[in-house]
Amino acid sequence: MDNENKGILIYAEITRDGELASVVLELANTAQDLAQKLGGVEVNALVISSEFTQHSIFQNNGFDKVYVVKDEKLKYYNTEYYSKITIDVINETKPQIVLIGATTQGRDLAPRVSSTLNTGLTADCTHLDINEKGMLAATRPTFGGNLMATILCKNMPQMATVRPKVLKKAENPIVKNTEFIEMKPQINGIDPKTEIIEFIKNIQTTGKRIDEAEVIIAGGKGLKSPEGFKLLEELANALGGAVGASRAAVDAGWVDHSIQIGQTGKTVMPKLYIACAISGAVQHTVGMNSSDKIIAINKDPKAPIFQVADLGIVGDVFEIVPELIKQLKG
Ligand SMILES: Cc1cc2nc3c(=O)[nH]c(=O)nc-3n(C[C@H](O)[C@H](O)[C@H](O)COP(=O)(O)OP(=O)(O)OC[C@H]3O[C@@H](n4cnc5c(N)ncnc54)[C@H](O)[C@@H]3O)c2cc1C
């Protein structure tokens, strides 16, 4: 293994609204632990944008250095520009680990960077650690979510993407005397093969967004029909929350795919998650088990959802939910 490589580089994604993607701070917090286990290596960031003003957020989240690449052409994400820049910065700064959020942008960028650098990429990780040999041990679900595989990368840099809301942000600021370094990789010769003509936001048509809600009331196949979800909407309104669903409920056509939670849906981390008539298959729990408090309502006392729940109610959802609504409104 090439010992020249040192430190952790986090791709600091800037969203279309010009904000730092929240997954960056989740990665930054975990990277602090990884850096400690590696004997106190640096945690650095790469920002690619047309402008850069967010210095304090990096200073308060434990970054040692921030490499900033600014250019008018970089206002919005573009595969060709962004991957060339990321590759150049990696080649110049030689990190041992590169972490990228498994967002739409990250999922486009990471494989292109890793294949050009001829290194491995473990995508969609749910846990990151350092093994006894000082290598990145990246864990992700495999075989349809029935197994968790921990994967090592033999080449440098070791690369991984992690879904938003799987790792936790730091609870308190990690203040560092961050150094901001402007970099100027050559992008003039690039002739992008694609151009964005219009940007259409993926808007959830009804209710509050599950990826922003602090309370989620999620329903499963046991709700039996779309009407069952009306009941959940009433409970969500009473608690100021959003309605989510299992894949079985989405596949039945009762609710829209935009509110599916789990491996092939969204990953959520609300303060309160109430699972109503959801069995708790691993493909579902992988998308919600980082929630602060989980309450499960299921008529089957052996339902696996109770294994991840802080509080379990064994009973009929059609009796318990109306009673909860009554108590809350009362
Ligand atoms: C590759 C792959 C990806 C997948 N991705 C996802 C994903 O992203 N998200 C996801 O959710 N699933 C996903 N699945 C499907 C997953 O394996 C389960 O099939 C699904 O989560 C089951 O949904 P459910 O719990 O709503 O339904 P069921 O398994 O049918 O469970 C219904 C539950 O409701 C309970 N119940 C019934 N009636 C009542 C009542 N009146 N009151 C109280 N409880 C009641 C039952 O006891 C039961 O536990 C995926 C599967 C595969 C293979």
Image: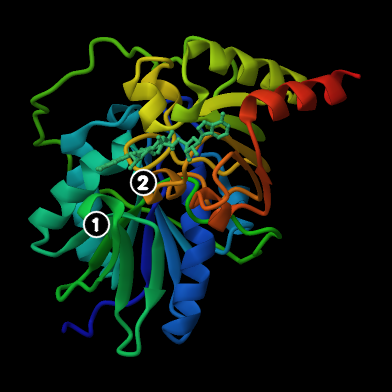
- Seen from this angle, which residue lies furthest right? 330
Q: Which residue is mark 2?
A: 283
Above or below for 249 versus 306: above
Query: For the residue marked with disc 1, what is the amino acid?
Result: Thr
Image-based side of 27 in relation to 1, left or right = right
Q: Position of residue 272 (x, y in %)?
A: 67, 41
Numbered mark located on residue 212 in the image: none
Numbered mark located on residue 142 in the image: 1
| Viewer-proximal residue among 150 and 47 | 150
Q: Is mark 2 within 8 Å of ligand 1?
A: yes
Please tell me which residue is depicted at 32% across the width and 37% down the height of the picture.
264
Which quarter of the picture shows residue 241? top right
Count of picture labels: 2
Please tell me which residue is depicted at 69% across the width and 15% down the height of the picture.
234
Q: Position of residue 128 (x, y in %)?
A: 39, 67
Task: Specify few, some or many for label 1: CA neighbours under 10 Å numbering under 14, 14-19, or 20 or more.
Answer: few
Chain-order first, disc 1 or disc 2: 1
Task: Specify few, some or many for label 2: CA neighbours under 10 Å numbering under 14, 14-19, or 20 or more.
Answer: some
Q: Position of residue 79 (x, y in %)?
A: 19, 35
